[in-house]
Image (cartoon, rainbow, N blue to C red):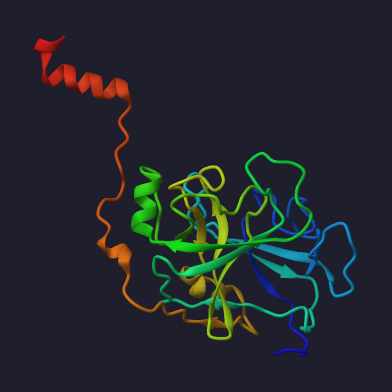
């Protein structure tokens, strides 16, 4: 499709309740100017193009308290021509498998560390491995890691997306194709040990995305992991984190002689 004019695009992005990744961090709403393909925010790029957002389509089942269905579509005001510098990314199709350990890359202009200012201004990229949902659930305890989410990060921490990276792409390479696995959604701090970043799992939304786009639907590619899914050997799930006072109360009820 390189070099051919693209129709007005419906672009995967995050819900507008947090600032989006990109050159324009203003709240996302119809009519807001967006900038594409800008690697350094404070310098003009002859290869970038500007478009307005004509329509924002949020997922009807988004749940703010749990971050489930944390996804929206943006319809651009006019077509964008693909060039050597502007090209679409394939979307992970339903049935894609991202096993524990699969390498992915996440990009954004957000904080380079929790609470660190100023923002880097240069586009940042970091390589992080997929963390299986069972293991991720064990890490996050009572916070629900649902099937529409995918996790990525290092056990020892140190590499992660951070504030203002929300909505940025998590991609992995299969052959010569880059496939988008997720969207930056939430996490516990930034790059903390045993707390991988949590992303919206794109493959869960193929049916919904296609239902919103009446023509020129995006390209979905099935990402297939090799080997076996080591996450299946992880036991556990929602970890119970009892406060100390509750533990002492239970001890008192079971062993009243010790009171």
Give the position of the C terminus as an image quadrant: top left
Residue 164, image x, y percentages? 67, 50
Name the side, left or right, on which 88 lies relative to 144: right
User: Camera-side residue: 198 or 195?
Assistant: 195
Q: Does residue 162 lie above or below 78 as drawn?
A: above
* Residue 94 in view in this figure: yes
Q: Does residue 118 lie above or below 38 as drawn?
A: above
- Number of labelled discs? 0
Looking at the rendering, which quadrant does residue 59 occupy?
bottom right
Q: Does residue 259 lie above or below 228 as drawn?
A: above
**Residue visible at 29% across and 50% down in the picture:** 237
Residue 197, image x, y percentages? 51, 53
Name the side, left or right, on which 89 lies relative to 139: right
**Residue visible at 39% across and 65% down in the picture:** 100
Name the side, left or right, on which 74 lies relative to 59: right
Give the position of the N terminus as an image quadrant: bottom right
User: Camera-side residue: 7 or 82?
Assistant: 82
Looking at the rendering, which quadrant does residue 13 occupy?
bottom right
**Residue visible at 74% across and 50% down in the picture:** 27
**Residue visible at 71% across and 69% down in the picture:** 75
* Residue 148 in view in this figure: no
Residue 229, image x, y percentages? 32, 70
Residue 239, image x, y percentages? 30, 43
């Amino acid at each position: 499709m390189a070099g051919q004019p693209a129709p007005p695009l419906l672009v995967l992005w995050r819900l507008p309740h947090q600032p989006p990744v990109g050159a324009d961090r203003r709240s996302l709403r119809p009519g807001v100017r967006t900038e594409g393909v800008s690697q350094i925010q404070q310098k003009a790029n002859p290869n970038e193009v500007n478009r307005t957002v004509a329509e924002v389509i949020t997922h009807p089942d988004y749940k703010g308290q749990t971050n489930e269905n944390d996804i929206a579509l943006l319809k651009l005001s006019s077509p964008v021509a693909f060039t050597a510098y502007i090209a679409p990314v394939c979307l992970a199709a339903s049935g894609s498998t991202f096993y524990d350990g699969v390498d992915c890359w996440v990009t954004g202009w957000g904080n380079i560390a929790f609470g660190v200012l100023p923002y880097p201004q240069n586009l940042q990229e970091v390589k992080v491995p997929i963390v299986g949902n069972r293991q991720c659930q064990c890490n996050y305890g009572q916070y629900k890691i649902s099937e529409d989410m995918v996790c990525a990060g290092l056990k020892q921490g140190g590499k992660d997306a951070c504030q203002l990276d929300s909505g940025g792409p998590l991609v992995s390479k299969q052959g010569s194709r880059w496939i988008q696995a997720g969207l930056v959604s939430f996490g516990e701090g930034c790059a903390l040990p045993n707390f991988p970043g949590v992303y919206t799992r794109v493959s869960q939304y193929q049916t919904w995305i296609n239902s919103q786009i009446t023509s020129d639907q995006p390209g979905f590619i099935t990402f297939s992991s090799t080997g076996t899914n080591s996450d299946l050997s992880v036991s556990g799930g929602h970890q119970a984190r009892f406060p100390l006072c509750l533990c002492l109360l239970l001890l008192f009820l079971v062993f009243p002689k010790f009171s």
